[in-house]
Amino acid sequence: MFGILRIAYKLLANDRAKFTALVMGITFAVFLMVQMTSMFAGVLSRSSATVYNVGASVWVMDPAVQTVANSIPMPDSVLDQVRSLPGVKFAVPIYSGGSLVKMADGTYQAVTIMGLDDTSLFGRPVMEAGRIEDIYGENGFIAVTDSEYTKIGSPKIGAEFQINDHRAKIVGLAKVSSNGLFGVPTLYTTYSRALQYLPNSRFTISYILVEPKSAADIPAIQAAVARAGYVALTRDAFVRQISDFYKYKTGIGTNLLMMTVISFIVGLSISGQTFYTFILENLEKFGALKAIGMTSRELVAMILFQAGFVSLTGYGLGTGLCATMIWIARARMPDYAAIITWGNLLLALGMVVVIAGISSWFAVRRVLRIEPFDIFRG
């Protein structure tokens, strides 16, 4: 069998023009497929950045909430109800809202402000400079040093600015596990200060963060919250809800799906046509091999090897090219969102296998119909 595969490789590699066209067609298709799906995966990951960064096990919210960025305020009485439920270890409020920061040079910058529970500071970021306790200081805010940090002038500890005509002071710098989706810097402060600095409606609690006594208590907590007219979602369920919103209720998912399908069609058309042409041009050689005793099974193995070799080569080159492009883009643009996941790679691999299968199917049908007598007679 090794000798047969060696012959198949030589037949393929000797026609360098066809071999290059086959590899480049699949490389280009894989590059587009992985790039598009990586961008989508990055968008979905960053859309749930707040959920990952806060780290609460259960989130209580208004039933109309679709994404973490669009919270609907709840009354304080809901917090008291949740705290009184059996199975709740603790429950704290968190504020999430937006505002404009007036910089020292007079310009304004939109920011996201997270108000942490004054008592526990649950959901706080990891400190890089300063102490978390300094957030209790007068006008204290903590800046997140993510890719958007430069938009507020990369402030150091002690820097001052204004929020709604209130004086604000940077008392610490912190990092979070995931950057946000909308390219807006993030500031942390206490819950009470967030309410003081930002205009609010009659209700003020964005979300209630719940830590159950055990995972077994979560269904009972969810049922009790539902009876009160609200929704309690686990972290994973909330992430899925946010992902479903961007997949099915915005144009992002549809557009990227169309680009992925187009990439697949491009790869199939280029590679399929080129591979079929390659088989037609080598029919005499396949006929000669059949005449000297090679079985149909061995001919099929040769064609499948050729299709598989070209497809996997193009898959590796396309994936490597995409990874290189994403690495360069992140070096130039720190807030670039694309990420390559196992799901992206497996999806592209599956599509490459389909391309190879369809291409080889047409080729196998043509080769099996040839008769050595017709080849030598010609």
Image: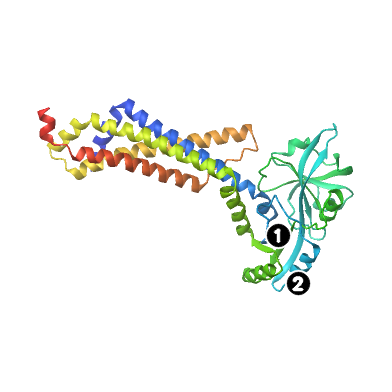
Q: Name which residue lies at 90% across and 49% down.
A: 138
**Quick one: SS at disc 1?**
loop
Q: Position of residue 263 (x, y in %)?
A: 45, 37
Quick check: marks 2 and 1 in contact, CB under 8 Å? no
Q: Name which residue lies at 28% across and 30% down.
A: 277
Q: Position of residue 344 (x, y in %)?
A: 49, 45
Kind of residue at disc 2? Ser
Say left or right for 10 vs 35: left
The dot on residue 44 is: none
**Quick one: SS at disc 2?**
loop
Which residue corresponds to mark 2?
84
In this view, 169 is above or below 235: above
Q: In the rendered view, how is the structure colored?
A: rainbow
In this view, 122 is above or below 337: below
Front disc: 2 or 1: 1
Residue at the far bottom in the pictured view: 86
Q: Residues within 10 Å of mark 1 (few under 14, many from 20)?
A: some
